[in-house]
Image: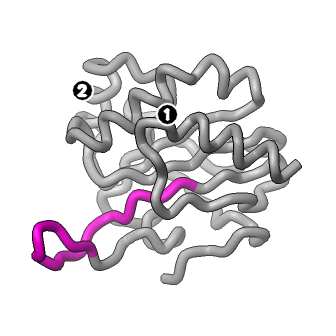
Amino acid sequence: MPIPKEGEKAPAFEATDQNGKRVSLADFKGKKLVLYFYPEDDTPTCTVQACNLRDNYPLLRKKGFAIVGVSPDTEKSHQKFEKKFSLPFTLLSDPQHAIIDKYGVWGEKKLYGREYMGLLRTTFLIDEKGIIRKIFTRPRNKKHAEEIIEAWATIK
């Protein structure tokens, strides 16, 4: 599926988090949501991004954001990742690509000249009414929280 566009209603989703709890987009109605898709738990770039969001979590929460990460990894993998890096936010398991496909973030990637299909690191900022307000197709992983806050300031 194509990636949704800014200004469109965010596609509904429901999946289990790292603790086996069902989480849906509807749970975030009335809240700003950072929905970020990342390829794999405990890999270098994914860890940098997650730790940046962790380190800036109090500021993001103060600004009214909830954070949800999504990857194709299992709940068990998410539990290990959360514990190892003390991640304070929800990680959804999507091994069947139900959410990943709805958000159009599975596609062709290149690494060292090799082409393959994989998850395209992407972040969606969703407003209190469920509307996608900003999409980062190439998040600055070391400064992701900063770019989220800066982008939101220009939206409102």
Main SS category, magenta section: strand
Query: Is 94 situated left or right of 89 in this image?
Result: left
Whether residue 84 appears in magenta in the rendering, the answer is: no
| Dot 1 crowding, Cα within 10 Å, few <14, some 14–19, many 20+ | many
The spot of residue 44 in percent (x, y) is 22, 39
Tell whether 60 sits left or right of 108.
Answer: right
Q: How is the image coloured?
A: one colour
To which quarter of the image does residue 51 belong? Answer: top left
Q: Nearer the viewer, residue 77 or 7?
A: 7
Q: Secondary structure at mark 2?
A: helix
For the residue pair 82 and 63, the one nearer the viewer reads as: 63
Write the residue at 66% across / 21% down: 59
Q: At x 44% / y 53%, what residue is drawn?
A: 37
Q: Is residue 13 above or below residue 40?
A: below
Please state the horizontal and vertical placement of residue 42, each as a whole percent of the image. Answer: 22, 36
For label 1, the SS is: strand
- Judged left or right of residue 112, residue 89 is right
Q: Return the mark for residue 44.
A: none
Q: Which residue is mark 2?
A: 80
Which residue was labeled with disc 1?
90
Residue 98 placement (x, y as % from top left): 43, 66
Q: Quadrant of residue 80?
A: top left
Q: Which residues are magenta?
A: 109-123
Q: CA distance from mark 1 to mark 2?
A: 13 Å
Q: Is residue 119 magenta?
A: yes
Identify residue type, mark 2. Answer: Lys
